[in-house]
Image (cartoon, grey):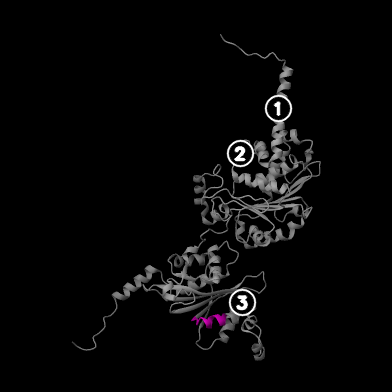
């Protein structure tokens, strides 16, 4: 026997029941959206991405948690370094302002959104406008956020409650507006960041313009979201000069350097295993490995790992530098006790001036010797960088006698420092790059040298800085370049391994200049070349004639 279920309720009552159920559901969604930004993104995701599923991961939760901390007033300076594809622009420049206007009931809040290109911020403004004007949003918060139809544009979205969001670019017209929230999303173009002039102009714009564009210096917030592109990019400026920023850094593969907890929020990276992925729901291992192969080591380091240079080094790996001394029992572990050196060289890279914003004058000194296998080796004997005049102050005998040695050296210029270092190391030659004030430096040094004391060479390097370092890469990879375990040596090694993404390159230029010179003069040969030369020398060595007949 079969039974059927019928509904004898009138159509009007069915519609009322449906509306009541819908209203309950709407209130539940509204309450959930008010509780968290992540809930809001999940509820309104289909407005901007109707054909793509919203994938939740702890990295997205972390971004939302830190933006919520800004809304709550826990922090008002936030820097987020996260890989591409982590929904940073959608979360920060589209959903977060809509969340603050509606669910957080702050419709008068004003935003200026900057990027290296206005087309990117205008794209995000369109998405933001689509969210706040959607039927769902207006059904829930239409009384809070009322939108005049003529105020939904690409460059500006505004409401009747005096709130607005302006899309601009680095250095654009938006810097004339004062806002409650300043969003800076990708201030550097990854390709253009290779230009030192463009990178420095972006940092200068940030220092001089942005901090004065806030409605309330104490309460207004600045949020910067970007991938690293260079040691001296905007993130580098914030790290070194602005300790009041909270930094959320999420490398694609866990390395432990940015574990947390984050300032003012207390968030900690949940990963513990080296290399564990940050967003496997969206970027599984096979996708990450595919992208890494296409990006190259610097792209992976900057965009995925949020480090301007690869962890072990870029062109030159840190592990390629060999630590002097090689055997503690031979040289008593003293890094200043070097083997008998057959040739000593100073290499100088000069700067234009002595002001703090100028490049450094850099000097490295090198010594060549042969190891037990009769292979040439080279060790860095000393290194320094200074900002100083070409010539120092001329002191009278009385003045010299009244000053300590350290006080006398404080009066030296570049010429005095070069001569002091060269004579201390008993150098055979001094290399000076033929640029900047190198010609004047060479002339002054030659005038002060004793006849036959050492030679001075003006070097005109070929190729760009990267090509020059690549040219000496085989010597590092061959394990023939040494440096003592000293702070000044670590300064050189760090700069060389970070090149070309590091803040400075003066010591790097000095190193590549010295090693190229020694290589071209035949004083440094690779291991297989030295072994071949030694074999040939043994093969064709004339036998010694007997002193008398036997």
Can you tell which quarter of the image residue 100 is in? top right
Query: Which residue occupies the foreground of this view, 12 or 549?
Result: 12
Is residue 47 in view from this perspective?
A: no
Q: Position of residue 403 (x, y in %)?
A: 65, 86
Magenta region: 418-428
Rendered view: 107 above or below 199: above
Left/right placement of residue 70 relative to residue 336 reads: right
Residue behind mark 2: 54
Q: CA distance from mark 2 to mark 3?
A: 59 Å
Determine the residue positioned at 56% across, 82% down: 420
Can you tell which quarter of the image residue 194 is in? bottom right
Rendered view: 98 above or below 258: above
Q: Reading the chain from its start, which is encountered first: label 2 or label 1?
A: 1
Residue behind mark 1: 22
Q: Secondary structure at mark 2?
A: loop
Residue 209 is a magenta residue: no
Number of other residues with Cα within 10 Å of mark 2, as a class: few under 14, some 14 to 19, many 20 or more: some
Q: Secondary structure at mark 1?
A: helix
Q: Reading the chain from its start, which is encountered first: label 2 or label 3?
A: 2
């Amino acid at each position: 026997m079969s039974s059927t279920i019928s509904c004898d309720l009138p159509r009007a009552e069915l519609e009322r029941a449906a509306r009541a159920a819908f209203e309950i559901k709407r209130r539940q969604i509204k309450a959930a959206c008010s509780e968290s930004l992540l809930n809001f993104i999940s509820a309104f995701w289909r407005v901007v991405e109707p054909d793509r599923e919203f994938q939740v991961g702890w990295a997205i939760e972390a971004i939302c948690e830190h933006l919520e901390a800004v809304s709550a007033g826990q922090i008002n300076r936030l820097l987020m370094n996260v890989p591409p594809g982590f929904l940073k622009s959608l979360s920060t420049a589209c959903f977060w302002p809509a969340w603050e206007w509606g669910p957080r009931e702050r419709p008068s809040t004003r935003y200026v959104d900057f990027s290296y290109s206005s087309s990117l911020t205008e794209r995000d403004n369109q998405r933001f406008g689509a969210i706040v004007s959607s039927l769902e949003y207006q059904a829930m918060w239409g009384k809070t956020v009322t939108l005049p139809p003529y105020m939904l544009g690409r460059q500006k979205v505004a409401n009747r409650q005096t709130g607005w969001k302006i899309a601009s670019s680095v250095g654009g017209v938006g810097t004339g507006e004062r806002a409650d929230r300043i969003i800076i999303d990708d201030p550097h173009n990854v390709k253009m960041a290779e230009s030192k002039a463009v990178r420095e102009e972006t940092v200068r714009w940030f220092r001089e313009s942005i901090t004065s564009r806030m409605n309330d210096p104490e309460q207004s917030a600045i949020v910067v979201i970007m991938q690293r592109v260079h040691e001296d990019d905007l993130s580098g400026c914030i790290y070194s000069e602005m300790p009041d920023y909270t930094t959320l850094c999420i490398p694609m593969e866990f390395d432990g350097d940015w574990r947390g907890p984050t300032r003012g929020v207390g968030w900690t990276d949940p990963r513990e295993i080296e290399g564990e992925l940050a967003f496997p729901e969206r970027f599984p291992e096979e996708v990450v490995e595919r992208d890494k192969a296409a990006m190259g080591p610097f792209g992976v380091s900057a965009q995925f790992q949020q480090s301007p240079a690869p962890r072990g080094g870029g062109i030159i790996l840190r592990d390629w530098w060999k630590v002097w001394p090689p055997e503690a029992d031979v040289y008593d572990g003293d890094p200043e006790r070097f083997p008998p050196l057959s040739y000593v060289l100073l290499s100088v890279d000069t700067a234009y001036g002595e002001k703090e914003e100028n490049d450094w004058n850099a000097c490295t000194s090198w010594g060549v010797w042969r190891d037990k296998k009769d292979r040439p080796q080279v060790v860095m004997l000393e290194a320094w960088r200074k900002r100083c005049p070409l010539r120092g102050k001329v002191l009278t005998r009385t003045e010299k006698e009244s000053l300590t040695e350290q006080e006398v050296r404080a009066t030296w210029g570049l010429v005095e420092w070069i001569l002091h270092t060269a004579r201390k190391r008993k150098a055979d030659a001094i290399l000076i790059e033929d640029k900047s004030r190198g010609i004047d430096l060479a002339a002054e040094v030659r005038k002060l040298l004793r006849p036959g004391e050492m030679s001075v060479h003006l070097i005109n390097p070929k190729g760009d800085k990267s090509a020059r370092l690549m040219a000496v890469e085989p010597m590092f990879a061959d394990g023939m370049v040494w440096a003592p375990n000293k702070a000044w040596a670590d300064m050189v090694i760090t700069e060389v391994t970070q090149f070309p993404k590091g803040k400075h390159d003066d010591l790097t230029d000095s190193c590549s200049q010295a090693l190229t010179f020694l290589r071209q003069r035949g004083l440094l040969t690779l291991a297989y070349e030295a072994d071949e030369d030694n074999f040939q020398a043994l093969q064709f060595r004339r036998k010694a004639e007997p002193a008398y007949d036997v």
